[in-house]
Each structure stands twice: as structure tokens, then as C-alpha cells.
Amino acid sequence: LLRSDLEVPEYVQCGGLEGVNAWLGTAGTVTPLHCDTPDNLLTQVVGFKYVRLYNRKQTPFLYIGKAKGMSKTDLSAQGNISPVEIEDPDHEKYPLFKKAEYEEAILGPGDCLYIPSKHWHYVRSLSPSFSVNFWF
């Protein structure tokens, strides 16, 4: 139903579209630090989002699958989510996280952000928000 209202950008179709997701949330909604296998074009339709990006070279500092006392099912069956609270990290529990370098952006209506395959990203809605992402 909603899919017919979306136009897939031409540059996403170069490698074949793998999926389209719609994200609707309130202010303060958080998507924890994670990575996706496909390339991702995150498009902001309504509202604003804070996005923090970590290059895949930063993986050793992000504690993926290294949380003490935590089973794989506690965070993700795929093992692609960091247990670190990105905006308020516990540096005693995760000391290497201090070394992780990142880029950040605020997306507003009409903005698009390309997130390369397996690059880590954290997202927090700054207002009620609607986004669409294209995996390719």
C-alpha cells in the first residue's frame, strides 16, 4: 500500500534493490548502534534525526559480541548490535570505546544519507519522525 507512494531513487537501483523500510517514531526513539549488510540510503521525510556513523574500521572499539554475561540473543541473533549506550557510554565497562572515531549529522525533511554496507550507525529521533530507507 505505502510502497506505491514511494519512488525508488535511480542511484539505488544500480546494484538491485534489496528492501525498503518505513520508520515512524516519536521524539527520543533510539535505534542502537548496529550495522546492516546491504548499502543503505536513509531518507528523512518528516521531522529530524540525529545520526552517528562509525566506519567499519572502528569495529574493535565498539564491543560487538563482547558484552560480559550477555548471550547473543540479548541484543541480536545476528550479532550486529553494540551494547554501548552511545550518547552516555560507561567507559569503565567499555574503555576502548573512547578510541572510536565517528562522524555525525542531523537529517531533516528531504535529506538523504548514504550508509555503506557494514558501517555502524546509531539513530535518535529529535522530533516525531518518518523516514524511509532503501537497502541495495
Image (spheres, rainbow, N blue to C red):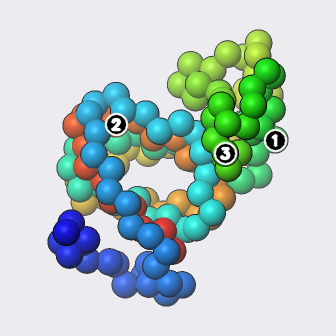
| Residue 113: quarter of image | bottom left
Q: Nearer the viewer, residue 35 or 55?
A: 35
Residue 125 has which mark? 2
**Dots 2 and 1: beta carbons under 8 Å?**
no
Residue designated by label 1? 60
Pick whichever of labels 3 and 2 is earlier in the sequence. Answer: 3
- Badge 3 crowding class, 10 Å Cα cut-off, few under 14, some 14 to 19, many 20 or more, is few
Q: 45 or 25: nearer the eye?
A: 25
Residue 29 at x, y = what percent? 36, 32
First-in-chain label (2 vs 1)? 1
The answer to which quarter of the image holds residue 86 is top right
Q: Horizontal and vertical percent for residue 107?
A: 34, 49
Query: Can the viewer see residue 71 in this picture?
Result: yes
User: Residue 49: horizontal and vertical position, in percent?
Assistant: 35, 42
Q: Is residue 125 above or below residue 5?
A: above
Q: Earlier in the sequence, mark 3 or mark 1?
A: 1
Left or right side of 45 for 136: right
Crowding at dot 1, Cα within 10 Å, few <14 / some 14-19 / many 20+, comes out as few
User: What's the amino acid at mark 3?
Assistant: Ala
Location of mark 3 (residue): 77
Label 1: which secondary element? helix
Left or right: where 91 falls relative to 32: right
- Residue at 38% x, 60% y: name it: 21
The three-letter amino acid code for the residue at tag 2 is Ser
Q: How many angstroms separate mark 2 from mark 1 (CA)? A: 27 Å
For the point 67% across and 16% down, the residue is 90
